[in-house]
Image (cartoon, grey):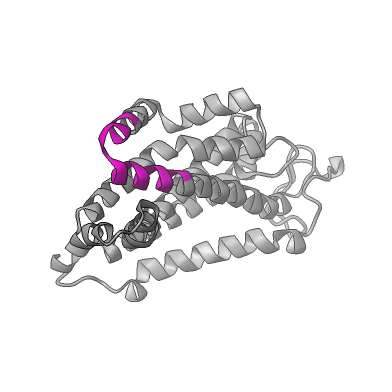
Amino acid sequence: MTMKQDILKSKAAKISFCVLLVIVLLGIIGPWIAPYNPTESNFDKFLQQPSMENPLGTDAIGRDLLSRMLYGARETLMVAVMSVFITFFLGTLLGVTSAYIGGIFDNVMMRIMDVLLSLPGILLALAIVAILGPSQINAMIAIGISSIPSFARLIRSAALTVKTSGYIEASYAAGSSHRWIMVNHIVPNITSVLIVYTTMFVGSAILDTSALGFIGMGAQPPTPEWGTMLSEGKDYLSDAWWLATFPGLAITVIVLTINILGDELYEFFDPRSKHR
């Protein structure tokens, strides 16, 4: 590649964006197009295979899997997006502030981040949920907090590069406040980094959301959530393949789509790609 590819002309970016848009729209309008109540049991229809009446089949207590998948899209995406918002806000604040202030403050904060990074993110999230108690809201908080160390470190590296720019020194010499410089100079100049890393963290957040739901530490039954549904279906793999297949496939597709989109965004914003 002799020049940076325009992301608008990238087939992979367009396909991944369209797939992601469809999933998000289904999550938004799911409650209005779901054919059945996702929590209503019907023991006359338990473990029925996919059919015209129930396109994705039914679960062990007769609930329509398609309806639960549509509702689950909203639950999974909501937890993931809100947890990434927590990561984005606190991680950006910590990373930019640490890079700008430097010195002892920077050293102390980064050592704390190093300690937290020594723990697997999902293990840290699990510990937080264990303290707060299993619930959808607590899972969202736990995932958001557990992702802050890695996000803050990435943003700090980008902010350190901008901090050494001449216009930052000129602005400081002109009497601009530290807050004004960080908000109006540093953050706008790392926008591309923020976009790329935030996109990539959404995929990780969805995996963590599903993982917590799978082990019973996220959304609690009967709330339809893809990780919880996957857990419910694992006991029926030989008798009812559809119970675990469709939630697992949905998680795989959305995470793969977001990762591809994140890679394309990185390629678009990376200046080194001009020379590839």
Q: Nearer the viewer, residue 8 or 241?
A: 8
Q: Residue 246's x, y, as percent? A: 59, 48
Q: Residue 225's x, y, as percent? A: 65, 44
Q: Residue 102's x, y, as percent? A: 27, 40
Q: Residue at x 29, y 51 (%)?
A: 159
Q: Residue at x 25, y 72 (%)?
A: 5
Please tell me whether residue 241 is drawn above or below residue 161 in the rendered image.
above
**Does the magenta-highlighted stretch encompass residue 76?**
no
Q: Which of 66 and 55 is in front in this view?
A: 66
Q: Give residue 83's quadrant in the image.
A: top right
Specify the segment rendered in magenta.
90-108
Horizontally, residue 46 falls left or right of residue 146, namely: right
Q: Please say whether residue 233 is visible from this viewpoint.
A: no
Q: Please say whether residue 187 is visible from this viewpoint.
A: yes
Quadrant where the image shows the C terminus:
bottom left
Quadrant where the image shows the N terminus:
bottom left
Horizontally, residue 15 falls left or right of residue 166, namely: right
Q: Residue 127's x, y, as percent? A: 53, 24
Q: Which residue is drawn at 51% across and 40% down?
A: 144
Q: Which of 78 and 170 is in front in this view?
A: 170
